[in-house]
Image (cartoon, coloured by chain):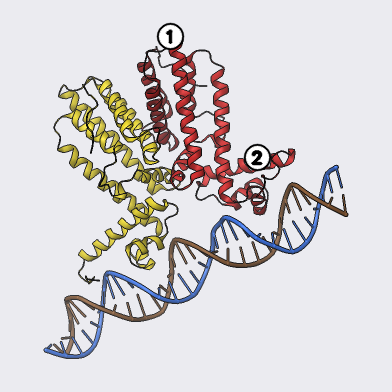
Chain colours: A yellow, B red, C brown, D blue
DNA sequence: AGGGACTGACTGAATGTTCAGTCTAGAAAC
DNA sequence: GTTTCTAGACTGAACATTCAGTCAGTCCCT
């Protein structure tokens, strides 16, 4: 153990984040319902009691872990999209982020987390709130992208709300087979079919390029 | 390890089905992971030991319950679709069955089951197989409907496979908010947006009617 | 009588949470 | 500058409960 814990804030904050990171890993491996405090503690190299010391209850640990993932995902997504200047390009990036797993992905980016998120939602209000926020965020991202693209003359005049609801559903529908590695609907196919729908509906040109390393 | 207990006998068969029915109810109420043998036994009015007597393990009980639901759903769907004579009408019925919950619905028709099905799939091969079968079945249903409609001149010439994959994803994407009663994407909206996509893509006329008794 | 359907009582293995402290770093007191 | 004190970080060991699965035996039909 190199570091001593004393200094207020700094050390404790790091410890907290390490626990969250460990929790996410275990959730992906064992599933939300089968994630034990003991597993998380062992993965983080500490005691069970410490986990409770930081999070009070198992439930709070797990829900905070989900929030942690969600916040990180959108932070990355926002940064990546802002680096692109056309609405069509941004929308394509958004779709790629959802459909195409990337080589250096952390386990915490696994879509498996979303399946657990959905399954826990009906009986866990805290989880349900996280899911609602993610879904709203997704729809709003698409909606504002469409409006911006229409204002810039890139996109045809479709109802932005209806389009957002539909595309969001389509993408989450693809999340299931992608997360479960269903051979019948691979990431590339999901990406291309999504782009075909989007470009067709919004009336901008798009052709299968992007080998996505 | 022989055959399952009394799969042929009258009384035993009924008992078995009652247990499955109870299991489905409990899964919908408490969630797959939190479904206890004791809950199922109590709901069915028998003892825990009897449940094990019929199903050997908790896992077999739960996976068989999922199979039971799936079989019943498709039996009903097939019957309903066969009562309609146009491909467009059949497709509409299929979409309605997926999007619009009906008044007299048994709890076992709840889409909540699907969320659990997906969440269990990554770590439970038996569940994964059921999910795969359901998904394949869904895609194949759509695909053959499209081919039939094209042969009859009802539908435009789209790639039936791509269309099936896309529509299947869209519908399952709508299943999430419908099951979770997300106000942002209600059943009626999901149905109408799905039909708009389908009619637009396949090139047949459709207008918002159907009050769905 | 015999066999299948069925049960109450039990067990052993988890597992979330509590608890009674230990240890350390720095502040306060001297 | 040394000692004392304090608060927070952290832990090992229990505790209390929950559950899947076992077992010895009962009931009932033929």
Instruction: State which chain disc 1 sits on.
Output: B
- The residue carrying mark 2 is B17
Q: Indicate which disc, 1 or 2, sits on the residue closer to the N terminus.
A: 2
Number of other residues with Cα within 10 Å of mark 2, as a class: few under 14, some 14 to 19, many 20 or more: some
Q: Residue furthest top?
A: B153
Q: Is residue A172 above or below residue B27?
A: above
In percent of width and height, residue B153 lies at 43, 9
Q: Secondary structure at mark 2?
A: helix
Q: What whole-number distance in Å separates the C-alpha atoms at marks 1 and 2?
A: 44 Å
Viewer-side residue, B8 vs B13: B8
Q: Is residue A8 above or below residue B51?
A: below
Residue A203 seen from this side: yes
Q: Which mark is residue B153?
A: 1
Instruction: State which chain disc 2 sits on.
Output: B
Q: Residue at x 37, y 41 (%)?
A: A179
In percent of width and height, residue B11 lies at 74, 40
Q: Is residue B189 above or below residue A97?
A: above
């Amino acid at each position: 153990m190199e570091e001593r814990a004393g200094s207020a804030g700094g050390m404790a904050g790091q410890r907290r984040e390490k626990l969250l990171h460990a929790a996410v890993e275990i959730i992906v491996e064992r599933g939300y319902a089968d994630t034990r405090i003991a597993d998380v503690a062992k993965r983080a190299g500490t005691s069970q009691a410490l986990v409770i010391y930081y999070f009070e209850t198992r439930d709070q640990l797990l829900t905070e872990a989900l929030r942690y993932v969600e916040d990180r995902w959108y932070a990355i997504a926002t940064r990546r999209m802002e680096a692109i200047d056309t609405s069509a390009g941004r929308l394509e990036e958004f779709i790629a982020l959802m459909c195409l797993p990337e080589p250096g992905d952390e386990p915490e980016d696994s879509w498996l987390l979303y399946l657990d998120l959905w399954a826990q939602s009906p009986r866990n209000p805290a989880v349900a709130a996280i899911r609602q926020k993610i879904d709203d965020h997704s729809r709003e991202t698409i909606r504002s992208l469409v409006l911006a693209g229409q204002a810039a003359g890139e996109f045809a005049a479709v109802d932005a709300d209806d389009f957002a609801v539909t595309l969001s559903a389509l993408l989450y529908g693809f999340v299931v087979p992608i997360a479960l590695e269903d051979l019948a609907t691979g990431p590339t196919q999901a990406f291309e079919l999504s782009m075909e729908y989007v470009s067709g509906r919004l009336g901008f040109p798009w052709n299968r390029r992007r080998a996505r390393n």
